[in-house]
Image (cartoon, rainbow, N blue to C red):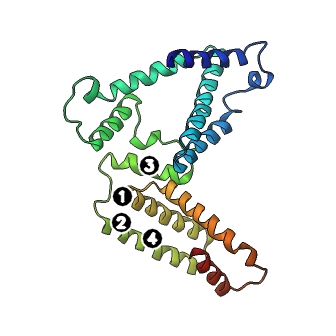
Amino acid sequence: MANNSFGRLVSIMRRLRAKNGCPWDRKQTHRTILPYLLEEAYEVIEAVNKGEKEHLKEELGDLLLQVIFHAQIAADAGKFDIYDVVDGINNKLIVRHPHVFAGKKGLYKDWHVRDFWEKHKKETKKRDSVIDGVPAALPALLRSRRLQSKAQSTGFKFRTYKAIMDKFNEELVEVKSAVKEKDSRHIREEIGDLLFVIVTLSYFLRVDPEQALQGANDKFIKRFKKMEKKLYSGISEKEILKLWERAKK
């Protein structure tokens, strides 16, 4: 049933892109539908964070549609089709999990598997560095986490919480120094370094910094809405803090 459903989806997309199909679908390119790919990916994340199973099922379908759409655009250009995409990921999963499919011993910890995965990618993709595969187009917070994850697979990492906090305090001092200098370029650089260390701390404590910040955003929204109607032009900082504390309670 699953294979028939998948094949039907592929057929529907093919028809939409055909000569007598949908005018809008027919004129789309890889580049024009990129915003939808990002939007659907974020909607999947939101559904997971909210724990909404039915919503997640729907959003995963929308995300799958984007993959099918890109593959059909490529098929129309005679490059590859969705089945080539599926074959590619099938082969990749088998090769990168030798402990499951080839009986290779030694990969008995999750970090063993991750290190093997990164080493294999570096070898097969002919990359000069393990971090070369991190897309520059990723949101900065997510890109920072991925860069650090890749780097740590080579052994480049902090071993203790204290070492990270010492680095955090060092970067905080440098931010304060830049502020005193009133050098906007230096301030931007040092704040960037401080944010990078916060991502390091998050990764060390096994916290997703993106989800942590989204949680803080949601908390801010709830608290701000409680005090918004009491705000006015010229309100003092002391009054704002007082309203904020009430909203927190």
**Dot 4 or dot 3, earlier in sequence:** 3
Q: Quadrant of the C terminus?
A: bottom right
> What's the residue type where badge 4 is placed?
Glu
Identify which residue is drawn at 45% across, 70% down: 171
> What's the residue type where badge 3 is placed?
Leu
**Dot 4 or dot 2, earlier in sequence:** 2
> What's the residue type where badge 2 is placed?
Ile
Residue 77 appears in the figure: no
Q: Could you tell me if the residues under marks 1 and 2 are in contact, i.e. CB atoms within 8 Å? A: yes
Quarter of the image where one finds residue 44: top right
- Label of residue 147 in the image: 3
Cα distance between the residues tagged 3 and 1: 14 Å
> What's the residue type where badge 1 is placed?
Phe
Q: Which residue is mark 4?
A: 171
Quarter of the image where one finds residue 30: top right
- Label of residue 164 in the image: 2
